[in-house]
Image (cartoon, grey):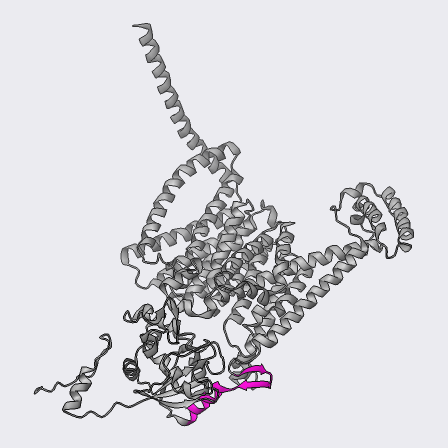
Amino acid sequence: MWWLLNSLNIPLSVETVCVFTAPIFSANAAWATYLLTKEVKGTGAGLTAAALLAMVPSYISRSVAGSYDNEAVAIFALILTFYFYVKTLNSGSLFYATLNALSYFYMVCSWGGYTFIINLIPMHVLLCIVTGRYSSRLYIAYAPLVVLGTLLASLVPVVGFNTVMTSEHFSSFLVFVIIHMVALVYYIKGILSPKMFKVAMTLAVTIGLTVCCAVIAIFIASVASSPTKGWSGRSLSLLDPTYASKYIPIIASVSEHQPPTWPLYFVDINVLAFLVPAGIIACFSPLSDASSFMILYLAISAYFSGVMVRLMLVLAPAACVMSGIALSEAFDVFTRSIKFQAGDINSESSIAQNDVSNVDSNATTDKSETVSKEPSRKNHEKEKEQEIVKKVTSKSQNGKKLLVLPQEVSAVVILLLIALGGFYVGHCVWTTATAYSAPAIVLKSYTPDGLRVFDDFREAYAWLQHNTDVDDKVASWWDYGYQITAMANRTVIVDNNTWNNTHIATVGAAVSSPEKAAWEIFNSLDVKYVLVVFGGLVGYPSDDIDKFIWMVRIAGGVFPHIREQDYLRDGRYHIDAHATPTMLNCLMYKLSYYRFVETEAEGFDKVRRTEIGNKKFELTHFEEAFTTEHWMVRIYKLKLPKNRIQGKLKNKSSSETYSSNQTRARNTRRNPWQ
Amino acid sequence: MHPLGLYLTSFSYQEIEKKLRMAKSTSSDAQMLIRSLRTAYAATPTNLKIIDLYVVYAIVTAVIQVVYMGVVGSFPFNSFLSGVLSCVGTAVLAVCLRIQVNKENKEFKDLPPERAYADFILCNLVLHLVIMNFLG
């Protein structure tokens, strides 16, 4: 986009483009939601759904100006692909099928969540076939998508041949085969007489069953030979929520991969959580292919959002569409009844309501508000209706039996609905302002003295940038990798994008080991500075001691000498006097609490709310380089190895061996005379 | 012959006759089925038959490619994939075209055949563009 704008001679820096990409795409996503809902229900529902999506906090959290995450673009591609699919389903034209495949390609390029699409659409096709809604439009919508989609997905280097090798795509091929068989069956049914068709069926079933069994046997044999049955780790962790915590701690440790709590649903999609069931019912009243697709999409995404917080994002568009449908249907019913009561509608549909309205107008005489006006108006209406009834009696069969409600009720309900919308808007704006707008680096807290700003992160990064050499490497936990790289301009060991589990496990092993072992690991990685985040003085809850359990688990997954049990006492992590000796000696503990007793807190950790166990200790292999104002970021420098003296001291140093798994690359020359 | 023995043999003879008749009927049913299929198919208009021929040709080409891969090995896997998928792709698109052009199909009554052919050409263009890219 930057290139395009520059070629049009609009000079913008790359940063500006990066910052604004997300909001532009979220605007496009709102437009795509309008199109999708228009295909499912109608323009009114479309506008409501688009307005809802424009503000839903879940999506805004990913598409704030400045957050350059690929999900802002991916959700837009997702909604667009679904729109084209539904449009092809409704119209049956190949042109939209091509556009469907192209937007699916766009989705593959932008996010790994494209497997959601390639599994949801086959499921919907299967659902349509099973419920007897097969039509040739279904074939046109699905078959080209599979072929073109597989080809286009294979073009993307990350996916490559996974499209035909992994189990995530097999459902699309299976349904591809099924839909061909169903199409063939329908075709033959069309050209044969019924008796012949029965004969054909018996023949086909016998042959088909044998072929099927053979194919399934081969398929199962080939899949069972691979260890994870062909599924990738991410998909498996979705299907079985406990898989990640057992096998892959690094995936389990990301906070976004945890299951969401109940309040989080309310925060993220607010009022929509109530409107969604109403939307589902509204989708059933004329059940078309498109509305069955929306119901399936909602159900599946609701299940997956219960597994991982991050997938709330996929639920958000479905929830917006359904709520849009529900809201617009509700508005429809109530405004129609108001209009009718005011006597505006003279169309044929009102005639069918005559019986119903007569009953209802009797019921409203209970209302105390405008009793004097009502009877006269109603008498007048009754006369008008009876005239119309005499004129057109045959057309009364035409309209549906619409439920016409009394006027006051409708007015009150419409006002309530508008108030509901107002609550939603208010909540969205509040959430965006507090939770998703503040930059995560500068923290504020409201104390009785006023606003206190903690600028420790930037203070530490600025110190790093000004006081260290350009080539110095900094080791920290991967959460801060990007920040250090961007703001301090120093090389880090692991950052937010590291997917090499062993790499992160090495850093985890280093901070979980005693000082000397940790020094050796860091020295082998050519690290000069170690950075830890410590929140005990001010009460910052998500510091490194808090994340320590994950460091131990991830390290333990790769290095077996780090056992989680060594750090636990009674199954819990302690840092006070009850802590295990391994815990009290490990690097993370020492680096966090070095000289902590000298502060005003005198060894009382505000986050853990206990006094620390090991209060006074000295660091032998590290020296403190910098601590920020509120002690939130602490930087330590690796001490250079002591000069080795031949003779007596050399023996002492060679006898201090620690855990055997550390690779001793140095060759310690043994004194041959000792 | 003993009357019971006569009765028994005639009974079993009837069973065998019934089985033979059933077998004959299924085979004659199969023959009738094939005949009726053939007559029904002959009734389709020529342009649809041409499209069907094209579909058969594409699928045969795909099968030949698979057999070739089985013989030679799948080293440039992307070429194999793109070749097979291009054949299957044009076959599928031709079937879609046939559905849209078929005059007996009530759903596509108001779709002008020119639009159907234009869509078909466009989709084929996109498909072959992707194939060329993927062929390696």
The magenta segment:
A442-466
Residue at image position (55%, 75%) is: A22
Q: Using residue A574 as the reference point, say whether residue A282 is left or right of it.
A: right
Q: Is residue A310 magenta?
A: no
- Observer-nearest of B73 and A420: A420
Q: Is residue A419 left or right of residue A625?
A: right
The residue sitting at the top extreme is B2
Along the line of sight, the residue nearer the viewer: A658 or A617:
A617
Towards the viewer: A579 or A102: A579
Q: Is residue A511 visible?
A: no
> Could you tell me residue A420's position as x and y percent?
69, 64
> Which quarter of the rendered picture does the C terminus of chain A lie within?
bottom left
Image location (x, y in percent) of residue A131: 54, 45
Total marks shown come to 0
Judge whether residue A578 can be spotted in this image: yes
Q: Is residue A447 magenta?
A: yes
Residue A390 is left or right of residue A672, and the answer is right
Q: Residue furthest left?
A: A673
Residue A226: % across, % down: 32, 57
Residue visible at 51% across and 57% down in the picture: A303
* The quadrant where residue A202 appears: top left
Q: Position of residue A346 (x, y in %)?
A: 83, 52
* Quadrant position of residue A241: bottom left
Which residue is drawn at the image coordinates 51% and 39% (left, top)? A189
